[in-house]
Image (tube, rainbow, N blue to C red):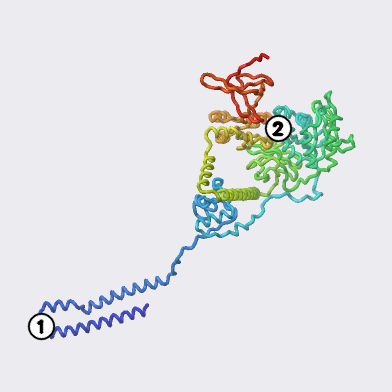
Amino acid sequence: MNRKILKLENLLRFHTICRQLHSLCQRRMLAQWRHMFSSAYAVHTAQLYTRPWQTDALLRAALSQRRLLVTKKEKRSQKSPLPSTKSKKEVEVWLGMTVEELARAMEKDIDCVYESLMNTAIDIDSLETHSRLDEVWIKEVIKKSGMKLKWSKLKQDKVRENKDAVKRPQADPALLIPRSPVVTIMGHVDHGKTTLLDKLRKTQVAAMEAGGITQHIGAFLVSLPSGEKITFLDTPGHAAFSAMRARGTQVTDIVILVVAADDGVMKQTVESIQHAKDAHVPIVLAINKCDKAEADPEKVKKELLAYDVVCEDYGGDVQAVHVSALTGENMMALAEATIALAEMLELKADPTGAVEGTVIESFTDKGRGPVTTAIIQRGTLRKGSILVAGKSWAKVRLMFDENGRAVNEAYPSMPVGIIGWRDLPSAGDEILEVESEPRAREVVDWRKYEQEQEKNKEDLKLIEEKRKEHQEAHRKDREKYGTVHWKERSYIKYREKRQQQPLKPKEKLERDSNVLPVIVKGDVDGSVEAILNVMDTYDASHECELDLVHFGVGDISENDVNLAETFHGVIYGFNVNAGNVIQQLAAKKGVKIKLHKIIYRLIEDLQEELSSRLPCIVEEHPIGEASILATFSITEGKKKVPVAGCRVQKGQIEKQKKFKLIRNGHVIWKGKQHKTVSFISSH
């Protein structure tokens, strides 16, 4: 740059010197010719030429402007030249992205994703913000948005570490000590199971149950006069509680099968035998109601042979005890038979280390929050212990026995109520003790994550199936319209559009009347499960669909009423309450609340509600038949009326009834007759 400036300065100085020399020459000529020109001309000529000091000022201004221009040019040349075309934005994506995640990665609105997927085989109406997109649709959205795709290997290949809590290894046999047997009483409804247990506990359990039927699993610790202790699980005998009975056999050591001597083997008796066999649990047979005159214990033993339950009298290994739960006959013999079988099994457990157990029942108490009844299977439970069950955890605040008395410790085979759960675990969940609250949260988070991953896999599978269906439908549409003339194609599309028009109010009312939305609330988890199992057996959805909107544990709330109003549903409550405020709100919104304390009454009510929504069936009852012998016309006023001459073959023909005209097995006319005339033949 300096060289250029110097060069310019030299050029300017040379030019100035030349001009000065020229000016001097002219001045000399002017001096010589002054006498020839006027003074005015001389002044004008002097102003035409620049003085030396004015030339220097011009030179300085020109040089400064030149320096400024050269400096700016050099700075501009040092900057990197801008690219001629804009580079595409790179978007990092991964498999299984949701619509919301893709929009966030693209830094665009969710509507942009929907717009990109228009006119494709994917069903946009079924897409939600949390819906997961297949690889094909992710590429399609990125391509239409004019962006560049980059697969994220980190999100594809990252595997989360398993943080679940697991059971301890088997304990050293030297640490094991004898424990009390856990005995489950099973059998058919009304065969006397709870009355039998009532005699052993010397309490009135059956009187407390609604309708004399056990509605929950009861866990009780019974101390016998001999000093032995037995933990009894009284499982319900009603058919709706099959799943609860199955859970009872999962934690039990011995099953006492109660069969009424006057009734014999029934449906739930067979189910109980099957549950015991599936769990590989030995059976003690208690033949109840032997005090009745019509009792036949031998008949019961013979009937059980068909189900591979062979009593000792017939050369088998099943102990059979004839008892009477009402009079208390042979109660001690039954207890001794149970204790003898438990000694043969050599039941032992490890009372040390972390606690392991099973949730027998769970419910929500207004004053105490979530409460569970559990059987401890290993370790010793104490106040302050941190427990995990399913997707819930607890710090034990209080423990109590079956009589509601607070206890400080719970040993193996002991039933105990636990208070302190953050959420309500499900009946049948495995209880494990962990070292701290952060560890408990970590386990619950992992289990929720694992459940979410399973759900995501199922969602991806469903999306793939839907995509294939839409692609196939799209292909068929193209084949259907491919060879058709454009006028015919337009007519077909118009006809299809007419068929897809929204339903008329009357049609919508008819469609909605064939759906029964239901909300189920129960007092405990097991009761709700039993009701849902019964609802699963409903198989007349083609006539009236049973739609389960919501289910849960606890009293009926305002949210339940609002939900029922939205879906035009019915609320069924089992052993729960609905306050006056809730009932008034339901009446105001036209929502039905049906409360029951006996499960089969609830099932009957549900059946009646479904029946009331079934479409009407028209039944025809023929009262007479006639054959047409001849047809002719008669004149009435100015009209000719066709007449069929008939002969009655069966029953009678009445004018006010409706008629069908059948020819070759096909009905060609229906309606009422105009007039009936009787003819009496003279022959």
Q: Position of residue 314 (x, y in %)?
A: 89, 35
Seen at 31% across and 82% down, the residue is: 10
Residue type, label 2:
Gln
Tell me if residue 471 comes above or below residue 522 in the rendering.
Answer: below
Q: Position of residue 661 (x, y in %)?
A: 63, 26
Direction from residue 363 to residue 283 in the image, left or right: right
Quadrant (top left/top right/bottom left/bottom right) for the C terminus: top right
Question: Which residue is labeled 1 in the image?
Answer: 36
Question: Which residue is labeled 2 in the image?
Answer: 215
Q: Quadrant of residue 318?
A: top right
Q: Quadrant of residue 328?
A: top right
- In the image, farthest residue toward the top: 682
Q: Position of residue 86 (x, y in %)?
A: 46, 63
- In the image, farthest residue toward the front: 683
Seen at 18% across and 77% down, the residue is: 48
Seen at 41% across and 72% down, the residue is: 77
Direction from residue 519 to residue 193 in the image, left or right: right
Tell me if residue 19 comes above or below residue 348 in the rendering.
Answer: below
